[in-house]
Image (spheres, rainbow, N blue to C red):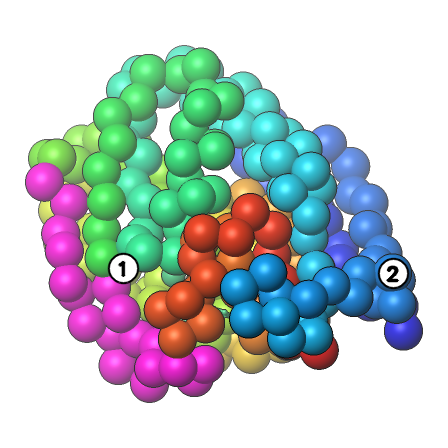
Amino acid sequence: MWISLISYPESGMSGSHGNYTHSVNFSTRMSTNPITGADDMVLLTNCELQSRVKELAQQINFDYRDKGEIVVIGVLKGAFMFFSDLVKHLTIDIVVDFIQVESYEGTESTGNVELRHQPTVNIRGKHVLLVEDILDTGITLSNVFVFLSLHDPASVRVVVLLDKPARRQAQVKADYTGFKIENRFVYGYGLDYKQRFRHLSEVRTIK
Ligand code: 5GP
Ligand code: MG
């Protein structure tokens, strides 16, 4: 079975670097889960992730080159690995902070977004870049937007590693997207399956 992962360097103040499609032949991606030994599949290898993360950082460096200090806020817990890889490639002036929200129980969103940790940096008048793991229904990001806008930032942009457009409910769009994927539950590279497997270096999906 072939699955298309459309990777699209979109938006930014500078325009696009061009679109391309990355196709995955699942029969070549079968791989046992290293912790449980269960059959599953690698959707994105660490090598594929690293090269895309670097491209996203280059676009962000260009777009924010004359914007002064940027507050880069990671959405915990899922974005922690993407966040740390991304900021290593940023050459602009940044301060980092984190926000933690929770909406998932097991593999399903409850639709109820709870704020568990707020950023401590003052974002009033600052350009904010939110770093999120997945944009799915959009409910999480739309709630985070509302929360941040209460603190009067100069702007808020969003970079997401993965976009699952099939399940969108809220009107939100990422400014920078790593990979657009079909509607599958994924884990690894920061993302959990019932709080496990966040430390795996690739994005996996259940067979
Ligand atoms: P949304 O509110 O857009 O539906 O969901 C956003 C959050 O749900 C993401 O930040 C992520 O934490 C979680 N999420 C959505 N899809 C998946 C998935 O396939 N796997 C995992 N582990 N988390 C997901
Ligand atoms: Mg998340």
Q: Which residue is mark 1?
A: 144
Q: Secondary structure at mark 1?
A: helix
Q: Residue at 23% across / 45% down in the picture?
A: 98
Q: Is residue 195 above or below residue 156?
A: below
Q: Nearer the viewer, residue 104 or 201?
A: 201
Nearer to me, 139 or 153: 139
Ligand 2 is located in which of the four quadrants? bottom left
Of marks 2 and 1, the one in the foreground: 2
For residue 71, the mark is none
**Location of residue 57 in the rendering, given as x and y in whole percent from the top left corner:** 53, 28
Query: Where's residue 95, x and y in %?
Result: 25, 25
**Badge 2 or badge 1: first in the primary sequence:** 2
Q: Secondary structure at mark 2?
A: helix
Q: Nearer the viewer, residue 51 or 168?
A: 51
Residue nearest the viewer, comparing 8 with 76: 76
Amino acid type, residue under disc 1 in the picture: Val
In the rendered structure, does residue 90 fall within the stretch colored magenta?
no
- The segment highlighted magenta reads 101-120
Report if the CB atoms under discs 2 and 1 are less than 8 Å apart. no
Q: Is residue 41 above or below residue 108?
A: above
